[in-house]
Each structure stands twice: as structure tokens, then as C-alpha cells.
Image (cartoon, rainbow, N blue to C red):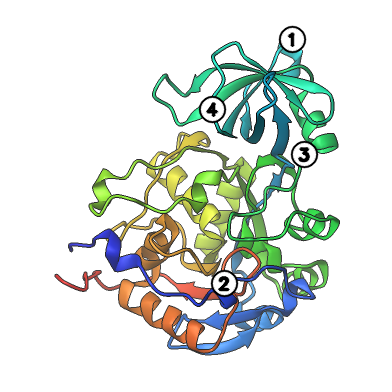
């Protein structure tokens, strides 16, 4: 195997990048790529599953993490909060954030944020060479973001956030605040569809992975081994590990809803004693999957780590063929776009220029 970054590139007509969600969550299209290529509608999913199968969802909740303000000099600044570091009971409110500004303030500099609160720069994170910044807020961060923040829509969505985005860029079962990007494959599930799946005998379980902004960053090194993966926090509850064991015992399939769920389950499988913490797992062709049998996922950015993940899961030639079909059939791409259903490959992966 000898995969390079350019192997995961493709040309996508800009008009196929979905700017708004489908009228109804489960009314989006579903490219069934488990065996061959079949065009479906997402709400037919229960017909494709069996009693005893296990759907595993990511129950993270997207926070209104985009905040605006200015430096004391008047220069505009934008923060995108990646995570809240210090619980309120410790008497200080620290966050880690991306900062967009023409000239970065010095450590100790105070930003005056829209909404009347302040953010004091404490340094870089996780160390002095880190790409992110650590700030101390003047009040509890989650409350400030809820009151004054904006939905952190992906960079390829061109409109400003609206009340529609507040509800639709969030899963119907979002539970644990902390993500700055939605687990988008799960956006297709609505309450009627979840009920039909339950009535069919399909089991469900949840993990949590707080999706970071790094999920949208393209890989920039042609040699994949030179790429430094971003950190994200995850948790696998005991109830979910028990549900997976029960699914295995009855011969059901473990079906991950979204690449974030795959990353969580496979991170846990690498070290079953670690059921929570940070993960920097980087899944590329040749990776040996230990938990996930099938995957429901949206279409991903060219040259992204998620293109590499789905290629590792379903096979590089098959994924590229599915993407060519999706483009030809004008499927809608990325976060607000359509979905695909994949099985894990069983053959040895082969690079296109091996």
C-alpha cells in the first residue's frame, strides 16, 4: 500500500455543496453502497436493517461557539471556542479557541466581546507551539455562548446562521454540549424514523465525541504519515460497551452513525480500559477495524481525513466509484447534504499506484 494525499482529491461542482438542509430530515437521499450502487431515500433505512442490529449514535450537542468582539485598539476579532477547560466551581472560566484577528494581542490582552463580557488571552494551547489559544472569560462560558454566540456553521456554508440553523444543525437527540461541528450523518434521523427503527427491533446506543473544527481542515502533507491529527474528547458509556457485546452475541451488526462514532468506537477498541479522554486517531487505508461493521455517513471534503477514513472502511476503489456516481447523479454534499450506507471491506486494500 502506498497512498498519498492526492489520491483522496476529487473535483466537486460548487453547486452540489448543500447550503441548507433538506425540507425534512429523513427526506434526504441515501446512496446505498453496501453492495454495488443503489439510489434510495433516507427514510427507507428501516427496510435495510434487521431486528437485533445496533445503531450507535454520537449524542454530542453543538454549542453556539462563534463569538465576536474587538481588541482595546478597536481591531475586530472572532473566536471559535473548541472546548471549555475549567468547570465553573473552580472560580475561573477558561476556554480553548481559534482566533481570527489581523494582529494577535499579547498574552494578558483583554478582548471586549459582543454581549458585554471580556476574554483575556492566557497563551497558546496545548503548548507554546499550539495552534489554538487559551482564554479566561469573565463569566460562565456555556451561558455566554448560549446568550451571545452564533452557530458555528462550516466554512463552505456561505450564509450567516439563522434560527433554522439552530434547530437543523443539531441532532434530535443531542445531549452533551461541547461540539463545534455537528455529527452530520445523524442529522437525517427524526423522531418518526427513530420510532420505526425501534418498532423493527433495531437497538440503539450512544457515544459522545465533541467534534472539533479540525474536522474541516484538509490534510496538507502529501505523505500521510506527516499529518498531525487534531484532538477531540470522547466517552464510551458502560451501557454502550454492554450493548455492543450483546449485539455480537446475537449475531447482529454494529452500525456506526457517522465517522465521529467510528473514531470513538475504534479509539476505545485500541485501549478498552480507556473509556473517555482525548483521541487523535487517524484512520487511513490499512487500518484494522475492530468494532464497526457498517457505516452511515455524509459525503466528505476532498483531501480530508474523513475521505481517508471511509476509504479505509469500504475500500478506496469503491469509495471513489461511489463519489463519481454521487456527483453524476447530483447528490448534495457535506454537512447539510445527503448520506451513504457502507459495509466494511473484507479484502486487503490496494493503492491506485501500488
**Label 3, label 4: how many angstroms apart (C-alpha)?**
22 Å
Mark before the other along the chain sequence, 2 or 4: 4
Which residue is more in the foreground, 124 or 310? 124
Report the mark closest to the observer, 2 or 1: 2
**Label 1, label 3: how many angstroms apart (C-alpha)?**
22 Å
Q: Quadrant of residue 74?
A: top right
* Crowding near the residue tagged with mark 4, few <14, some 14–19, many ≥20 C-alpha atoms within 10 Å: few
Label annotation for residue 250: none
**Label 4, label 1: how many angstroms apart (C-alpha)?**
30 Å
Mark before the other along the chain sequence, 3 or 4: 4
Which residue is more in the foreground, 234 or 31? 31
Which residue: 65% across, 51% down?
206
The residue beneath circle 2 is 333
Q: Is residue 101 above or below residue 36?
A: above
Q: In the image, residue 23 lies at what x, y percent?
A: 79, 75
Which residue: 73% across, 48% down?
151
Q: In the image, residue 259 lies at what x, y percent?
A: 51, 58
* Crowding near the residue tagged with mark 3, few <14, some 14–19, many ≥20 C-alpha atoms within 10 Å: many
Q: Secondary structure at mark 1?
A: loop
CB under 8 Å between discs 2 and 3: no
CB under 8 Å between discs 2 and 4: no
The residue beneath circle 1 is 91
The residue beneath circle 3 is 149
**Label 2, label 3: how many angstroms apart (C-alpha)?**
26 Å
Amino acid at each position: 500500500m502506498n497512498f498519498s494525499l492526492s489520491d483522496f482529491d476529487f473535483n466537486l461542482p460548487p453547486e452540489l455543496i448543500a447550503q441548507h438542509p433538506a425540507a425534512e430530515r429523513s427526506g434526504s437521499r441515501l446512496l446505498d453502497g453496501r453492495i454495488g450502487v443503489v439510489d434510495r431515500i433516507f427514510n427507507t433505512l428501516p427496510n435495510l436493517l434487521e431486528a437485533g442490529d445496533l445503531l450507535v449514535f454520537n449524542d454530542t450537542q453543538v454549542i453556539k461557539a462563534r463569538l465576536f468582539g474587538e481588541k482595546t485598539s478597536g481591531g475586530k476579532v472572532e473566536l471559535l471556542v473548541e472546548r471549555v477547560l475549567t468547570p465553573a466551581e473552580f472560580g475561573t472560566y477558561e476556554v480553548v479557541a481559534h482566533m481570527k484577528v489581523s494582529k494577535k494581542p499579547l498574552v494578558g490582552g483583554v478582548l471586549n466581546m459582543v454581549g458585554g463580557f471580556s476574554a483575556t488571552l492566557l497563551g497558546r494551547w496545548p503548548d507554546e507551539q499550539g495552534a489554538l489559544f487559551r482564554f479566561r472569560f469573565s463569566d460562565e462560558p456555556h451561558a455566554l455562548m448560549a446568550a451571545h454566540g452564533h452557530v458555528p456553521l462550516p466554512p463552505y456554508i456561505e450564509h450567516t446562521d439563522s434560527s433554522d440553523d439552530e434547530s437543523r444543525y443539531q441532532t434530535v437527540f443531542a445531549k452533551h454540549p461541547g461540539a463545534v461541528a455537528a455529527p452530520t450523518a445523524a442529522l437525517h434521523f427524526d423522531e418518526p424514523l427513530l420510532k420505526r427503527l425501534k418498532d423493527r427491533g433495531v437497538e440503539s446506543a450512544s457515544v459522545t465525541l465533541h467534534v472539533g473544527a479540525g474536522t474541516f481542515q484538509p490534510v496538507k502533507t502529501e505523505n500521510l504519515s506527516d499529518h498531525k491529527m487534531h484532538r477531540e474528547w470522547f466517552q464510551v458509556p458502560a451501557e454502550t460497551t454492554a450493548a455492543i457485546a450483546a449485539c455480537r452475541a446475537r449475531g447482529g451488526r454494529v452500525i456506526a452513525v457517522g465517522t465521529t462514532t467510528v473514531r470513538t468506537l475504534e479509539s476505545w477498541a485500541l485501549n478498552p480500559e480507556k473509556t473517555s479522554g482525548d483521541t487523535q486517531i487517524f484512520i487511513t487505508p490499512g487500518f484494522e477495524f475492530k468494532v464497526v461493521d457498517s457505516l452511515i455517513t455524509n459525503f466528505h471534503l476532498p483531501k480530508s481525513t474523513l475521505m481517508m477514513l471511509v476509504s479505509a472502511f469500504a475500500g478506496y476503489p469503491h469509495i471513489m466509484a461511489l463519489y463519481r456516481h454521487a456527483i453524476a447523479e447530483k447528490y448534495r454534499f457535506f454537512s447539510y447534504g445527503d448520506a451513504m450506507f457502507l459495509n466494511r471491506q473484507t479484502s486487503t486494500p490496494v493503492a491506485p499506484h501500488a
